[in-house]
Amino acid sequence: MNRGIHGSFGVRFSRIVGGGALAALLAVGLATAAYAAGDAAKGKVIFTTNCASCHGESGKGDGPVGAALNPHPRDFTKGEFKFDAAKDGKPGSDAALTNVIKNGAGAYGGSPLMAPWGGTLSEADIQNVIAYIRTFHK
């Protein structure tokens, strides 16, 4: 069937636009998945047990031990991260946070008081903690 020049253009245009829309949806989905790798509910349990004494129950860096530390622990409610621990130009990326949690902040020029948890927490535990940390910044 002959659709003429406009009919042919419409099919090609919809394929291009449709493909672009699909690519955009996939990109958004992948970006969301990058921040949803862990289970925040499981991360809350781990955070409360291992991190809240310094970072505080609400993630503001105001835990009972953290109040005595200098510098004070990171305030996760601000969503500001200092260390590009993954060397990817993205401080605060999941990869950077994973490295800081595993190796401690001192390994990246931060406070040596931020202990390395790599020998204590599993990879899944760390991803769960990161997922929970992300819930503090709204």
Image: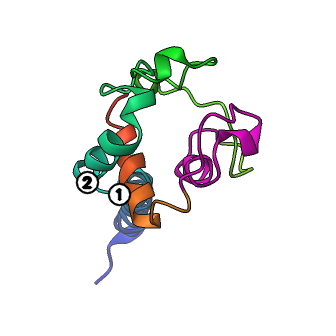
Q: Of all residues shown, which one is farthest toward the left? A: 41
Residue 131, compared with residue 80, is above or below; it is: below
Q: Which residue is mark 2?
A: 42
Residue at position x 53%, y 26% from top? Answer: 74
**CA distance for labels 1 and 2:** 8 Å
Q: Which residue is mark 1?
A: 38
Residue 57, compared with residue 92, is above or below; it is: above
Secondary-structure class at tag 1: loop
| Residue 30 showing in the rendered view | no
Q: Amino acid at mark 2?
A: Lys
On whether residue 73 falls in the magenta region, the answer is no
- Residue 34 in percent (x, y) is at 44, 56
For the C terminus, give its image quadrant. top left
Residue at position x 71%, y 50% from top? Answer: 88
- Could you say which is closer to the camera, residue 2 or residue 8? 8
Callout 1 touching callout 2 (CB < 8 Å): yes
Residue 102, compared with residue 77, is above or below; it is: below
**What segment is highlighted magenta in the picture?**
91-117
- Residue 101 in percent (x, y) is at 55, 49
Q: Amino acid at mark 1?
A: Gly
